[in-house]
Image (tube, coloured by chain):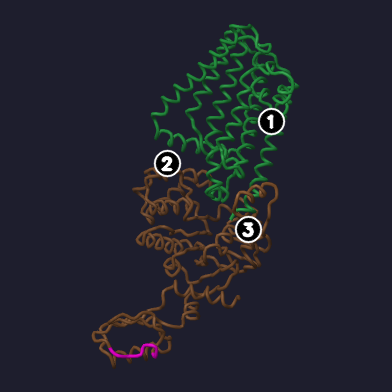
Chain colours: A brown, B green
Amino acid sequence: MMIEVQHLHKSFRVHVRQAGWLDAVRHLWKRQYQVVEAVKDISFTIPKGEIVGFLGPNGAGKTTTMKMLAGLLHPTSGKMNVGGFVPFEQRPEFKKMMSLVMGQKSQLIWDIPPMETFLVNKAIYEIDDRTFRRTLDELVELLELQPLLTKPTRSLSLGQRMRCELAAALLHRPTVLFLDEPTIGLDVHTQEKVRRFIAEYNREHQTTILLTSHYMGDVTALCDRIMMINYGQLIYDGELSVLTEKLAPYKRLEVRFSEVPNARWEDYGEVAEVEDSQVVLRVNRERVAEVSAHFLQHFHVYDINIQDPPMEEVITRAFQEELSHGS
Amino acid sequence: MGRYWRIFREFFRACFVEELEYRSEFLGNLVSSFFGIGIAILTIHIFFYQTDRLGGWTYADVLVLLGVFNTLKGWIDFALRPNMPRLLEHVRRGTLDYILTKPVDGMFYVSFRHLVFWRLIDVALGLGLIVYGLAEKHYMPSLVDILVFLITMASSLVLIYSLWMMLMTTSFWVIRIDDLSFIFDSFFETARFPIGMYRGWVRVILTYVLPAAVITNMPALSLLGKWNMATALIAGLLAVVFLWLARRFWRFALRSYTSASS
């Protein structure tokens, strides 16, 4: 196992403060503290070479967990092991085998070309010239960096910068990679590029990757396994397809008619949308074949489209279900 | 050690490249350095119209002192000052996380990552002024003088670094950095003059609490042959103690950072 986490807890002490200047003054000498449990009893393992998607709403504890795995935060309690190391001991050997990329924070230096940051990293990670050349060549090719290397970072677009960030983080060939929202703010085309790169890099080097993202596309494209976290608790850990089946036991049936029939749509499934000539139904998986056959036989169907529900919908449902179970 | 020297060289190289982006700054820096030292000499000159001694020091002595001051100031502006606002940015934006995940000492990285090498002009001018002051006095320092000078100068560098680092570390909690370097500057300015000029408790504070006087006066005195091995060793010891304190404080700040931020 590359990553092992057992009964991980993390609580923060934050001070609470009411609005208003009177309270601000009172706050100067008497602070009220509140303990916030960011992560509650999380356990999981990730084998070498696996890409795992880490999902959850804002403030659910994703980043906190990831920071603990990267050795940046001390866990309040629980056991962690990443590649044979205890992360928060911050051993140099541990730091050399992992890397962290945060979509919202940049490690490149604004005023100088990315190549300079790469060279600084080369010195810090003690990469010898030959290995550095080889790794850089590979990354330059995969990420199409050639024209970007010598431009000042400030003149790069967000997408170009992100690609350089990935290269900077991978120069020392980490075996574990933590990606915290690597595609945030990128356009669809660049997101696609970054995803393809991550998938390819993982295949090539068997890098273990833990990925958080707000974009379902990232997760569906890259991960077979997902972990869902909400209110600091792990609420799902398993295959993505199983989750879909469990939480969304229906398919999306989109039908367009050339001649609008007179039918009671409720009889076939849950109605999502009805327009003049088009209807979108959520139909139970077992009934999909039967319903569509029925439509084709009895109505003038112009077009029919059967899809899995969009991931967003599934995830939202998962969290709602969790909520209703929880309360 | 060798490894850190290599990393430092790499920082230097990267900053060199960075500053070549702004070539025009070279001239501006050159002018301001000459102007700064010119004004300083002029001020001393004016003092000596009124008197022939300043806190027991002659004109030539004070020139040597000013040379030491300028050298140290150049060092601060070269390596320390450029890094202070960056640490604040790192803490505020959370990019400190990147530094902490790198296999390099965090304190080393945040203190030396950014170097403004134009400021080495001040170091050169300071050394020049020291030589000029000695020539003015017609004093040729002996080898031992120079050796003690090197020891006390090294102690001063370490002391300044430690004080600066402690101040910098407060940026984990303090948000306004301009005020911080202002504190340091006003304290360091006192080191421009002979300690004998100060009286009473100010003198005590400047000798023992914030050893500004020790920082410039001791190297200057050593070079002028008025050294004292015991005080030189005390300076060395003081430097080590302050470095240790700075290190402890940095560790403490990191601990609170790693257990608090989200």
Rendered position, A257 above or below B113: below
The answer to the question of whether label 3 and label 2 lie on touching residues, with beta carbons closer than 8 A, is no
Residue B138 percent coordinates (x, y): 60, 7
Residue A19 percent coordinates (x, y): 59, 54
| Magenta extent | A261-267
| Res. A18 image quadrant | bottom right
Quadrant into which the C terminus of chain B falls: bottom right
Residue, x 55% and y 19% (percent of image)?
Answer: B127
Would you say residue B220 sits in the magenta stretch? no
Is residue A308 or residue A58 the one in the foreground? A58
**Label 2: chain?**
A
Is residue A166 or residue A170 the one in the foreground? A166
The label shown at residue A132 is none
| Relative side of A300 to B4, left or right | left
Q: Which residue is mark 1?
A: B239
The label shown at residue A112 is 2
**Amino acid carrying mark 1 in the image:** Ala
Residue B227 percent coordinates (x, y): 70, 17
Binning the other alpha carbons within 10 Å of mark 1 as few (below 14), some (14 to 19) or many (20 upward) gives many
| Res. B216 image quadrant | top right
| Relative side of A135 to B192, left or right | left
**Amino acid carrying mark 2 in the image:** Ile
Q: Secondary structure at mark 3?
A: loop
User: How far is mark 2 from mark 1, CA to CA?
Assistant: 35 Å
Rendered position, B212 above or below B45: below
